[in-house]
Image: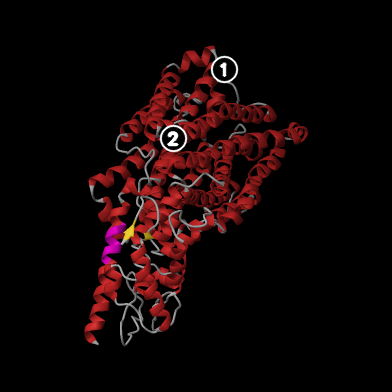
């Protein structure tokens, strides 16, 4: 019999230890003799229930002390988001520079269709990257894909910085192509970083860790402006002499964006697979236990005796013989726990406790492919065909869509909005125009975006995700209404008040739905669909960004230059209200384990029961044949 304490591993009582010692000695005397399959099913040698071992492993992750590994995970993931924001929002400053360098005959402004293409290209690539990498991370593993997206970002960043005019391809179109590729890499970063941080995090700090990763966006956004300021000061004399020298500035501004990615790519490629993926998709309990013990150091379970540890090592080393002679695994195909070669029959018994257990949770990399428990497309459709699960995906997707319509609508067009209140005129002196646009962006980010992100980090575990999201949508809706309907009086009386209110909208977007729409999809879906669900939700957000940019480009000059901006701000208020409505489809995730949130424990228990039944049935059939 086992005596179990919640959250702890199993411990044998004295009678069980005596029986197990005798069994262990008998097996040492006759290594060819294996216990019967019925011993495994009713609690013979090393009958540790996989359920208990799995729960113990998850408990170590969920209840671990916050340590260096958690800090490292946040830093490695956060550097990616720093780079993403830097590269995405740099185009906000690069576009007016291109106007002075290449479009002097168009009043030093990039034509509206080209400007829209430059800003939409990355969002389109991001849409495909989020869905594609989200799916691949569930099918192939988080570790196998993590780092690939940064390599794509690095290559695309260099490509943008070095591209030029050609007879068959103009410079703006070349930048669009590279920004699409950049977007694919940026898109891959969303589901991968969110899910990896979520699956490694402790329950009580998961929201704060994911928010801290996402908060690096604010620093990336700010750094874009700071680097531009330094470059403008360095090239000031040359720019005043000839505005075409801005060509040096925009190329350096974009190219420097790959520096943090170069620093982080090694650490991403060497990060271990998440234990939850190893447990629930690869079905490899031993590897998951080893990985957890490596990243969250513990000598052994507090209730585990020395004898238990010896027995565990003996069980782990005991191998069920297979035709292909793999030490711990089976063939290259077949269902969970069964190799293509089948079982090697033994004269006395055909299955052992350890052998059956190893067949269920194999450490062989080849068998991990055979044992792969990722959901098929049919299972995915079946899972989300139920309203109680589909409404969660609908809620996370539509809230992100509504948020990004406004977030990217203003984020990629700060220069136009600032110029509309005469803070940063598009025409006139090249240096002063770009300088004002850059300083204006830095002020808005410092006043609104950066504080908003970190308010979320420090308060999300106290207030919860949904309260912050509701508050953010409500306040953003109110502020957009004020800016939109009172645009004329504010515009005429006080540009400073306009900038303050504009920064306040960014504060409540980031201390609100911009952070929570990233966090919640990384928590509410089962392990086998978590990355895909996050990718779909994020992809819907990027559709919102594309809609926003198309709408902004089409409407901002309707009735005159920048005359349509008040109506656009009113439309953004409407989308904030829509996001608020869909928030009520999303559950609160504060203080709950990932398994509690998505019912994954029931699914895993059914899989374990099904596999144990199948293993015992096969073994008994072999016994009958003998």
Q: Between residue 170 and residue 464, name the one nearer to us.
A: 464
Question: By what rule are the colours in the image chosen?
Answer: secondary structure
Main secondary structure type of the part rendered in magenta: helix
Q: Residue 575 carries which label?
A: none
Location of the C terminus by quadrant is bottom left
Q: Which of marks 1 and 2 is nearer the N terminus?
A: 2
Residue 574 picture quarter: top left
Location of the N terminus by quadrant is bottom left
Residue 625 picture quarter: bottom left
Give the left or right position of residue 6, taking residue 233 as reference.
left
- Tell me the magenta residue range: 604-610
Give the structural element (helix, strand or loop) at label 2. Answer: helix
Please count the marks in the image. 2
Label 2 packing within 10 angstroms: few (<14), some (14-19), many (20+): some
In this picture, is 25 found above or below 136?
Answer: below
Give the structural element (helix, strand or loop) at label 1. Answer: helix
Q: Which mark is residue 461?
A: 2
CB atoms at circles 1 and 2 under 8 Å apart? no
Q: Is residue 434 magenta?
A: no
- The Cα–Cα distance between marks 1 and 2, rounded to whole angstroms, is 34 Å
Q: Between residue 501 and residue 20, name the one nearer to us.
A: 20
The image position of residue 82, as x and y in percent, is: 57, 42
The answer, for residue 263, to whether it is visible in the render is: yes
The image position of residue 458, as x and y in percent, is: 50, 32
Is label 1 or label 2 in front? 2
Q: Residue 496 carries which label?
A: 1
């Amino acid at each position: 019999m086992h005596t179990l304490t919640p959250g702890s591993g199993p411990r044998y009582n004295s009678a069980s230890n005596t029986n197990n010692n005798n069994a262990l000695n008998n097996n040492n005397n006759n290594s060819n003799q294996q216990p019967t399959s019925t011993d495994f099913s009713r609690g013979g040698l090393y009958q540790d229930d996989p359920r208990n071992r799995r729960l113990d492993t998850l408990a170590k992750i969920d209840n671990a002390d916050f340590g260096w590994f958690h800090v490292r995970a946040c830093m490695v993931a956060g550097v990616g988001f720093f780079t993403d924001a830097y590269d995405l929002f740099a185009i906000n400053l690069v576009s007016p520079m291109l106007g002075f360098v290449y479009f002097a005959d168009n009043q030093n402004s990039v034509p509206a269709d080209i400007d829209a293409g430059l800003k939409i290209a990355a969002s389109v690539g991001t849409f495909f990257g989020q869905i594609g990498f989200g799916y691949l991370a569930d099918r192939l593993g988080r570790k196998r894909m993590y780092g690939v997206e940064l390599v794509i970002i690095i290559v695309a960043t260099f490509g943008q910085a070095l591209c030029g005019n050609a007879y068959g391809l103009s410079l703006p179109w070349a930048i669009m192509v590279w920004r699409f590729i950049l977007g694919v890499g940026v898109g891959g970063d969303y589901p991968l970083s969110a899910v990896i941080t979520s699956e490694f995090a402790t329950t009580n700090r998961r929201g704060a860790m994911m928010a801290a990763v996402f908060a690096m966006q604010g620093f990336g956004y700010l750094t874009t402006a700071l680097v531009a300021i330094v470059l403008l000061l360095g090239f000031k004399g040359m720019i005043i002499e000839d505005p075409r020298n801005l060509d040096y500035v925009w190329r350096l501004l974009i190219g420097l964006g790959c520096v943090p990615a170069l620093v982080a790519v090694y650490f991403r490629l060497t990060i271990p697979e998440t234990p939850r993926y190893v447990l629930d998709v690869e079905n490899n309990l031993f590897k998951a236990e080893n990985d957890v013990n490596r990243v969250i150091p513990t000598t052994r379970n507090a209730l585990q005796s020395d004898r238990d540890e010896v027995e565990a090592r003996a069980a782990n080393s005991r191998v069920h013989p297979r035709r292909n002679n793999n030490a711990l695994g089976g063939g290259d195909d077949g269902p969970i726990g069964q190799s293509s070669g089948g079982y090697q029959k033994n004269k006395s018994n055909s299955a052992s406790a350890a052998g059956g257990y190893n067949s269920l949770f194999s450490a062989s990399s080849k068998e991990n492919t055979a044992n792969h428990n990722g959901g098929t497309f049919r299972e995915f459709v079946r899972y989300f065909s139920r309203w109680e699960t589909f409404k969660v995906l609908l809620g996370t997707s539509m809230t992100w869509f509504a948020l990004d319509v406004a977030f990217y609508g203003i984020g990629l067009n700060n220069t136009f909005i600032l110029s509309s209140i005469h803070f940063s005129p598009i025409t006139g002196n090249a240096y002063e125009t770009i300088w004002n646009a850059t300083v204006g962006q830095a002020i808005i980010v410092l006043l609104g975006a950066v504080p908003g992100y970190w308010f979320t980090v420090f308060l999300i575990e106290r207030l919860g995700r949904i309260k912050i999201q509701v508050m953010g949508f409500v306040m953003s809706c109110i502020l957009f209404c004020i800016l939109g309907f009172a645009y004329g009086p504010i515009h005429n009386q006080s540009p400073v008040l306009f900038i303050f209110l504009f920064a306040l909208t960014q504060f409540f977007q980031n201390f609100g739905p911009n952070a929570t729409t990233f966090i919640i999809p990384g928590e509410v879906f089962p392990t086998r669909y978590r990355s895909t669900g996050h990718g779909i939700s994020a992809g819907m957000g990027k559709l919102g960004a594309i809609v926003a940019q198309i709408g902004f480009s089409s409407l901002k000059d309707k009735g005159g230059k920048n005359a349509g901006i008040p109506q656009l701000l009113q439309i953004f208020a409407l989308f904030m209200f829509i996001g608020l409505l869909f928030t009520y489809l999303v559950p609160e995730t504060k203080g709950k384990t990932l398994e509690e949130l998505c019912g994954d424990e029931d699914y895993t228990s059914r899989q374990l029961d099904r596999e144990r039944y199948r293993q015992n049935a096969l073994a008994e059939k072999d016994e009958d044949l003998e």
